[in-house]
Amino acid sequence: MADPATAPRDLPAELSLARLALRNRSVYWGGLLLCIIVVVAIVGPYFTAEPSALNPTNRLKPPGPNGVFGTDMLGRDLFSRVINGARVSLVVGLAVAVIAVSIGLFLGLIAGYIRVMDALIMRVMDGLMSIPAILLAIALISLSGATLTTVVIAIVIPEIPRVVRLVRAVVLTVREEPYVEAAISVGTRVPTIMARHVLPNTIAPLIVQATYICGSAMLTEAILGFLGAGIPPEIPSWGNIMSEGRTFFQLTPWIIFFPGLALAATVLAVNIVGDGLRDTLDPRIARNMR
């Protein structure tokens, strides 16, 4: 008989899932790239020049001795501005994902489990989805003014219906399961049923959805900034950096190239992680990975 002290022990479900996720190449490499970007965004501004410092004698210089990424039309260091812009994009992406998933989860649980509220909530969501996200965001920012908070709220609102529809679809399936019907038959309270049986089934798809929302939010923020309806110009973001440089694009393409490359790399990393998590959390695919 094996010694109990040396016998293998079952890993906790959370640890086992984390190890399985790290075995997925998409999660590993996408997560590594994303971690590098996050570390650079947090630490980088402390080791770079002031992003708003003007130097007219050094304007429109190409990448080289005058700056790793060159300078813009006002002589500002483009490398410093791109690094500081990473903070804005990551904050917007994370904030939009957390807020949209939280509100969408709450409304989706109600719509999927309480039939009386289903029609009302879903008609409101259908109405929001009928409005183009960019136009709705521009309208809200025009009414409230361009601030970081306003931009986050303007991007969150169009994302909520997508989360609500996802959660509602999961809840409609789960509430017909035998274990849910058994809980109802023994008189278990609705909040308890939703917390114990319904909510856990929404976690996996919501994690995947949150990664896509994060990437989409960063792209939307960049589009708003490029159109001049996003973050104020005094706060460097990848969108308004590209917006300021488009006039000089033919002469100085690096002003748009470097922030665009940073944006593409960040969104790519987030989406790769999302694809990997989808494969890991899907029982049919995960079973083949073990």
Image (cartoon, rainbow, N blue to C red):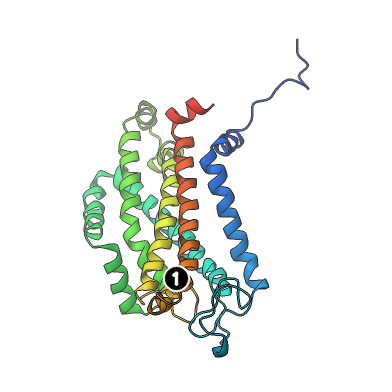
Please tell me how many numbered marks the rendered image carries.
Answer: 1
The answer to whether residue 24 is left or right of residue 217 is: right
At x 49%, y 36%, the residue is 280
Q: State the SS at label 1.
A: helix
Q: Position of residue 195 (x, y in %)?
A: 45, 42
Q: Nearer the viewer, residue 118 or 251?
A: 251
At x 60%, y 36%, the residue is 19
At x 56%, y 45%, the residue is 29
Question: In the picture, which quadrant includes the C terminus?
Answer: top right
The residue carrying mark 1 is 256
Amino acid bearing label 1: Ile
Image quadrant assignment for residue 200? top left
* Residue 139 in view, yes or no: yes
Is residue 114 positioned above or below 254 on the image? above
At x 64%, y 74%, the residue is 48
Is residue 66 positioned above or below 95 on the image? below
Image quadrant assignment for residue 75? bottom right
Q: Nearer the viewer, residue 200 or 256?
A: 256
